[in-house]
Amino acid sequence: MPDPSRAVFEDALEASAVPDLARNGLDRAIEAHPDARDRLAADADLLTALLSVTSASRALTRHVEADARALDVLADLDRPVAVAADSPEHLVATKRLEYLRIAARDLTGAAALEATGAALAALGREVLAASCTLAEASGLAVIGMGKLGGGELNYASDIDVMFVGEGDHGAMVKAARNVLEHARRCFRVDANLRPEGRDGPLARSVASYEAYWDKWAQPWEFQALLKARPVAGDAALGAAYHEAATSRLWSRPFTSDDLRSIRAMKERAESEVAKKGLTEREVKRGRGGIRDIEFSVQLLQLVHGRLDPELRSPTTLVALAELADAGYVDRGDADGFAAAYRFLREVEHRLQLVDEQQVHAVPTDEAERDHLARTMGYRSSVDRSAVDQLDRDLAAHQATARAIHERVYFRPLLEAFAESDGALTDEAVDTRLAAFGFADAARTRQAVSELTRGLTRSSRLMQQVLPLLLDWLSSSPDPDLGLLGLRRLASDAARTGRLAATFRESPEVAQRLCQVLGTSAMLGEILGREPDLVARLADPAALRTRPRAELVESATKALEWRSDTDARQQALRRWRRRHLLGVAARDLMDVDDVRTVGRDLTAIAEATLEAALIALDPSIPFAVMALGRFGGGELSYASDLDVAFVFDGSSATAIDEAGRLATRLMKFLKGQTPAARIYDVDADLRPEGKQGPLARSLNGYTAYFEHWLQTWERQAWTRARFVAGDRQLGRTLTRLIDPYVWGDGLDAEAVRDIRRMKARVEQERIPPTEDPKFHLKLGRGSLSDVEWTAQLLQLEHGLHAPGTMAALDTLAAHDVLDPDDAAVLAEAYAFCERTRNRWYLVHGQAGDALPQQADRLAVLARSLGTTGADLRNEYRRVTRKSRAVVERVFYGQA
C-alpha cells in the first residue's frame, strides 16, 4: 500500500526554506518519536513548524529529536511553556521548550521581530526568577541591562545583569553567585556591566550604587542605565534601584564631553571590527549596522530625555518612534532606521539560530550564505540568486542606516532653523547643540543661514552636506571655532560653490577639514588665505614634507623673480605657511609622530634660511650653523632658530661683508613687525654672546674655542650642525671645533658645572601665567630634564647624536644608559613635546605649560583624544618616572 503521508511530506518539504535540512529533521523526528509520522501527516501547521525549525537550526533539530514534548509545543504555538522552578533540570528543559516555541513562531511568520525579542526577554526574566527561587535568594533583586532590560533579546544574546541587595554583604554576594549558577544553565549571563566590572563586588546595596554613580561612574555607564530595569527577585528592592538609577540618569546634565567619550568608545569598537576585515559583513558593529541605529537612538535619548520623559523607553524601536513623533528625528529618517533595524536584527537572528552561537557576521562560505538567504525568505529567480538578493538588500539597508546615522543629529536642527514653526522647540534645539559642543545657538543659526542662503546650486549642495559637516565639527575639539572657520572659508558665493563641489567629490576632505578648523584657528587662517590647499586634505601623502633639496629649490623659485625685498619676504612667508599647514595637518591626523614633526619643521626652516641667504647673494664664503633644537633637528612649532654665522676670510672687507650678511639675513627673517616675521632668529649662543661679533671667521672660532670655551658652551655646541650657505665651510668649522666640544669627555669639575647650571635653571621663576606643576619645558621630569641628561651623558662618553631622542637611542645602544631608563625618558620627552606642539596649534601662540583654565585645558585634551583630568594624570605619570631617572642618572643620587 502506498504511504499517504509521503505526498503530504514531499509537498511540505518542497515548500520549506531548505528542503535537504528539513528532510533530515523530519526523518530524525519520526525515528525518535513513534507517533510523530501520524501527527505530522494529520496536522499541517505542526508539519510547517517542524520543517521551518529544522531548516533553520541544527541546534533546535537536535532538541526536537531529544524531547518528545517538542512536538506538543510545535503543535500549539500560541500556548507559552511555563518555566519550571522546582529543579535545575526542569528549569533547563522548560526553558528549551519555550525557546523552541518562540523560534517556531518567528520562523513561521506568526511573530514579528518586536514580538520575538520581547518573548525572548520575557523568557530571560522567567529563567532569572526561577533561578532566584532555586537559589533561595531572598533580599536580592536582579537588574536586567542591555537587550534584556530593553525587552529586545537575541537568540544568542548575553543576558546582562546586576544585583542589588540589602543586609549582610557576604550573604548578598553568595546569593547572587547561586542565582548566576542556575541561570547559566540556560543562558550566557554576564554581570560585568556592574560598577568596577570584574573587580567590583557582585552585589551592592542601593546606597552603594548611588555613591558610585555620584563619584566614579563614566558616561558609558549612565548610557547603560537607559536600559536598566528590575527583572527578577525582590520587587521592592528592584523598584528602589530603578528609582535611584532613573534619578541619577536624568538629573545630571549630559555634557559635550560625555558625548565625546561615548562616541569615542563606539569609534574604537568600529576600528576593531575594521581590523578584522568585518566592516561590511558585521551586521552588529559594522558600518551601517545595528549598533549605528541603537547608538543614535540612545544618544538622542540622553540629550533630550532629561527634559522630555516620553523619550525614556528602553526599547530601541519604541524610543525611535517616540523621537520621531516629537520631532527629534526626521520622520523619513526614523522610518529608514526602523526598516534597517528590523532587517539587520532578522539577519542576526537567523545567523544565531543555526547553532545558538553569538554570530554577527554574514558568512563567506557560499553554502552558508545560501542557507541564510533562504531562511530569510529569499528564493532564486531567473534573474537573481537568493544570495544576490540578500546581498543587495543588506547593502541597501546598511547604506541607509549609515547615512541616517551621520545626519540624524543635525537634520532636524536645520529644519528648525529654516522654519519658524519647526517641530523642535528652541529649548530642544539649544539642548542638542550644547550636547554636541555648540555653545552659542544664535551664532550657530546665523552660520547655518549664511552657509545655505540663496537658491543657487552651490547653496543647495551645501544644504545637503551641512548635516554631515555639523556632525564632523561636533567631533572636533572646538565645534564653535570650527563652524566659524567654515563660515570664513565660504565667505562668498564663489568660495561656497568651490567648497561644496570639493565636499561632494571627497567627503574625506570635508571630514578632515572639520577636524582642522575645529582644532586650530591658526590653521583655519592659513586655509582662508590658501584655499587651494583644502583639496589636499583628501590624501595625507600629498601633505608630506618633501626632501630638503626639493624644498630649497621650491623656496628659491618663489623668490628668484621678485626683486623687491618686501615682496621676497612676503613670498617666503607664504611659502613657509603653505608647507607648515602640511606638517600640522598630518600631525592633527596622527599620521606623523613627534620625531617626524620635528624633522619636517626643521627641514622647512633649513630651506627657508637657504633661500633667504641665496637671495642676499653672498660675495664671500658664508655659512649658517644651527644650534639647540634647530641643530638637533627637533624644532617645535614655536621654536626660535638658534644659529651662529661663520665666514672664511680675514680682510676688513670680508669682515664687513660677513657682518652685513648676518644682519640682513636676520632682519629679512625677523621682519619689521611680528606680522611680517618669517622666523625669530637668535644668535646669542655664538662665542661671547651678544658682546661678540655677529659673524666670526674660521680662525676666530678656532682661537675662541682653544682659549675661552666654557663648559656651558661645550654643551650648547653638541647640537651644532651646518644648515645653509657654503657647505664646505660649514663642514670645515665642524671639523675644527669638534675636538674642543667633545674632547676627552668631562672631568669631575665639568660635571659639577653642568649640574650647578641645571640647578640654577630649575630655580628660575616660571612666568605667573604658566602652571609650574604642569610645565612641559621646565617641570620636573619634563623636556629640559631629559635634554640636560642626554647632553651630560653624551659629553661624558663622547657620543655624537643629532638630537635628544636620537641621543637616547645612541646612549642605550652603547650601554651608557639602561634601555629601560632611555625608554622612560623618551616617553616623557615625546609626551611633553607632542602636548606642547598641540597647545601651540590650539592656542595659536607659544605656551610651555598645560593651561590652567578648565575650558582651554578641555579643548587641548580633546585635540589629543583625552580629557583634561586624564591629560594631567598622564603628565604626572610620565614626568614622575622621568624625574626619578634624572635624579639617579644626571644628579647621581642613589
Image: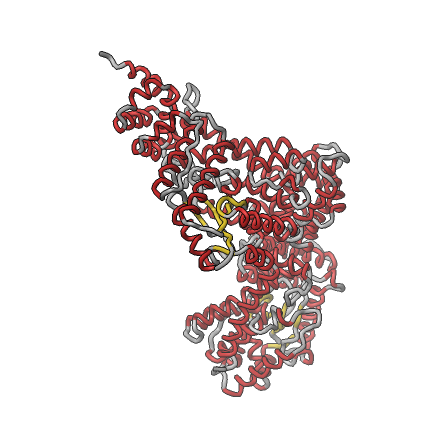
Whether residue 494 is visible here, answered yes or no, is: yes
Specify the color scheme: secondary structure
Q: Residue furthest top?
A: 1
Could you tell me which residue is drawn at 55 percent across and 70 percent down?
A: 879
- Quarter the N terminus occupies: top left
**Picture coordinates of residue 791 (x, y %)?**
52, 76
Left or right relative to 547: residue 190: left
Whether residue 541 is visible here, answered yes or no, is: no
Could you tell me which residue is drawn at 55 percent across and 38 percent down?
A: 315
**Picture coordinates of residue 830 (x, y %)?**
54, 64
**Picture coordinates of residue 581 (x, y %)?**
63, 54
Vertical order, 458 against 584 (above or below): above
Of the pair 453 and 341, the residue shown nearer to us: 341
Of the pair 771 and 799, the residue shown nearer to us: 771
Of the pair 651 and 829, the residue shown nearer to us: 829
Q: How many marks?
A: 0
Could you tell me which residue is drawn at 57 percent across and 81 percent down?
A: 702
Q: Based on the displayed image, in which of its 4 quarters is residue 500 positioned?
A: top right
Q: Residue furthest bottom?
A: 749
Q: Based on the displayed image, in which of its 4 quarters is residue 753 positioned?
A: bottom right
Q: Based on the displayed image, in which of its 4 quarters is residue 416 positioned?
A: top right
**Picture coordinates of residue 529 (x, y %)?**
70, 50
